[in-house]
Amino acid sequence: MLGKNKIPKPEARSARDVKTEAAAELTFTAAPAADPLAAHKRPRRNAAFKIAFNVLFLLISVSVIALIASNEFGGSAADGSRAAFSEVYGVIKGRFGYLLVAVAMVAGLTLCDTLKILMLSCETKEKISPFAAYKTGALGRYYDGITPLGSGGQPFQVHYLIKKGVKPGAALSITFMNFFTQQLAYVIAAPVFLITLTVRGQTQAWTAAAMWIGYALFAAVPVLILCLTVREKAAMSIVNAALRLMKKMRLLKDYQKTSDKIRLSLGDYREAARAVFRSPVTLTVAFMLSFAHFALYFGVPYMVMRTCGVESSALGGLFSQMVAIFFTVSIVPSPGNSGASEATFYYVFKGVLAGGFMFWGVLLWRLLTFYFLILQGLIITLAAAITKSVSAVRKETDQT
């Protein structure tokens, strides 16, 4: 009765409701009042910085290729210091089959990414279409290629999966399990080739040091992902350290808001990730695809060399050399290791490719393993932007 002033019992709330309210409170408290003019200036300044940064390293990459071209074509075809273009074209035309195999290998890289993402989505009970899995992998490669140290791919993959209706925790699990299996496969397979080069003395002291430093940093990533899955507090400490670094590099706008979102999704991520770890079949197939990715990626330059007329007898250590180049330039903080990759390739193989073939070898290798992936991601990004704009225009037209 009303006269007894009974206190109504609080309504039962689910864990999801509590988490949602906590997220709202954290988001609210993490965004203090700011100068409205500064809110508009910061994004513009950050965007301008990113554009300038990417343009700078694109120019460096183009400059290195131009320098290689100048060095290769600086001699005379008559004195034999370089081959005439007709001769280069004739060699490449006669070995066009090797180039087709290289292109098929690049397609195989995309197929490995797509199959892994598709399989992991099924394991987390968040099924997506094969085309969505392909786009997720392609966007990851694209943003890896245009951000320093390849740091941008995974966040954009998570964002895309969430837009496709995948739960945030599952999106984190799919993305990081895909990344984890590939990184760990590279870490397991690479030492055989790196140790072989070191023991044989086929690397100089500075290149050996850079190679092993790059390998150590590369190997630290799977450890971080395991930490995210097992130890939440330690994981958040590492995540926050990485976020602070990204903040200083102007790759992150709101440190606190991003940290809060990750912490709230970490529980769902750990559940989805543990489901993957509990499936030996899924893990085994994922690792097999990752090892296939390793073999295909480092097999492309072999086919490029064969396309440029180099005989197989001269390419005995090429696979090991390419693995060494990969880890040596991985410490260079440029998008796609621009400039460093081309320069290191030239330095290592200048005695194998000569007389005008070095330029075409470098160009074909980078076109297949880097610029093609950038173009692929750019087309997907532009198509999505155009589709969104067209939909917005149609919606406004329908409303009027």
Image (spheres, helix red, strand yellow):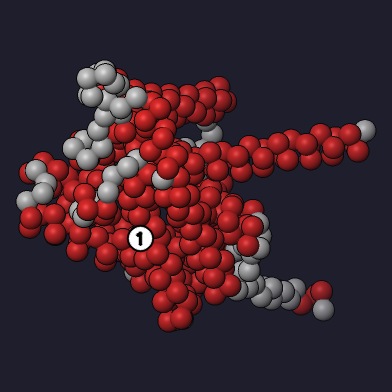
Percent of width and height locating residue 379? 60, 39
In the image: residue 199, left or right of residue 283 = left
Q: Is residue 172 visible?
A: no
Percent of width and height locating residue 211? 18, 48
Going 85% across and 37% down the picture, which residue do you hit? Answer: 394
| Rendered-image quadrant of the N terminus | bottom right
Outermost residue on the front side: it is: 78
**Amino acid bearing label 1:** Ala
Going 49% across and 44% down the picture, which residue do you hit? Answer: 373
State the residue position of label 1: 295
Going 34% across and 40% down the picture, which residue do you hit? Answer: 308
In the image: residue 53, left or right of residue 39 = left
Percent of width and height locating residue 120? 52, 69
Percent of width and height locating residue 243? 38, 46
Q: Nearer the viewer, residue 353 or 265?
A: 353
| Rendered-image quadrant of the C terminus | top right
Above/below status of 300 relative to 12: above
